[in-house]
Image (cartoon, rainbow, N blue to C red):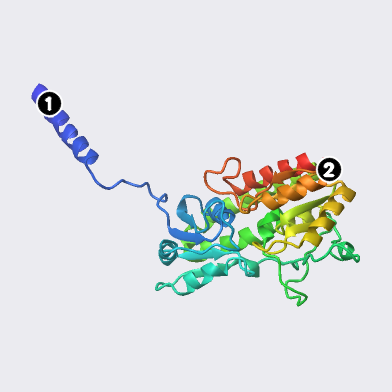
Amino acid sequence: MQKRIFLICACLLIVFVLSGCSTEEVIPDGTEPDLKVVTTIYPLADFVKQLGGDRVEVSHLLPAGSSPHTYEPTVEKARLVERADLFVYVGADLDNWAVNMAEAADTEIAILDLSEQADLIEAVEYHDLENDDLEENSHEHDHNNHDHHDSDHDHGPEDPHFWLDPLVVRDSICPAIHKELVALAPGSEDYFKNRLEQYQQDLNVLHEEIVAAVDGFSRDSFIAFHSAWQYFADRYGLEELAVIAQFPGQEPSAGWIAELVELIREKEIGAIFTEPQFSPELAERIAEESGTEVKIIDPLGGEGVPRRETYLELMRFNLSVFKEAME
């Protein structure tokens, strides 16, 4: 009897040792990623992660702190795109540098242009502030009865920063991503649907938080370094009076800066909003001349960036900065 017990224990020990020496990790059913998805900017990657869960492996191309307007991808990034099942980009001329990479890939890749899914608004072009240009650049704001301009207008370039409106994300962007995930992995449809519905609820909560906070603002106008915040402003009844740099890398004239300083003083603007993707030097100079301050808001966030590692965290971070400047 003792001999039999000894043999059983010895066999179990051998099995245990052999299994421990295996070079392959045993992955439970349903947890191995079904799809590889690459996006251009980090917020889109987070949307895919939230909707795809452990059925999707997600990568993004734009490094934290870089601007999608000026980024030049590397060969390594191109190889990342080539291995993807789905490539997701903003569109509307924001990240066209990545489209060529996807279209040139040797393998077949599903490509999703999110700008085709959202109702885009026209990009405001700020010139001189004199001669009533300020009134011409103003928007009508009503977050209770909000409709974006028709996306097929022909009055000028379209603003690509639609992801900064949580309801556009909820109603247009997430359903479009969900549809692509289901098409590529139909066996996970129920799983993806449950995650979509949960994330849409999370976006509802975020939207309600922003509405409640904005209702307590004593100011409704702001100055930004870069014109990325029109969707956010339109949704929540705020007004972007002007931007410092109409185009990244293009410094405004001395006359424009002088008029902007006067506008900041006249409107008692609480802060100039700049972004970590751009140098704050010019904004700091204007803030010093006008007697206001510079605060950082972030349209992109990123992995390892404190308080900005998910889209929900990113938008709550931005809301907290708006509150500091506008309450």
Q: Horizontally, is 299 left or right of 38 in the view? A: right
Residue 1 appears in the figure:
no
The tag on residue 6 is 1
Against 103, residue 310 (above or below) is: above
Amino acid type at mark 2: Phe
Total numbered labels = 2
**Quarter residue 322 falls in:** top right
Q: Disc 1 vs disc 2: which is toward the camera?
A: 2
The residue at 68%/60% (across/down) is 162
The residue at 54%/62% (across/down) is 71
The residue at 73%/75% (across/down) is 152
Q: Horizontally, is 230 left or right of 98 in the view? A: right
Circle 1 residues within 10 Å: few <14, some 14–19, many ≥20: few
Q: Residue 295 at what x, y percent from top left?
A: 71, 44
Q: Residue 171 at what x, y percent from top left?
A: 68, 59
Residue of label 2: 217
Residue most toward the left? 3
Residue most toward the top? 2
Dot 1: what SS?
helix
Q: Residue 216 at what x, y percent from top left?
A: 84, 41
The residue at 76%/75% (across/down) is 153
**Quarter residue 7 falls in:** top left
State how far apart marks 1 and 2 are (Cα).
Answer: 77 Å
Amino acid type at mark 1: Phe
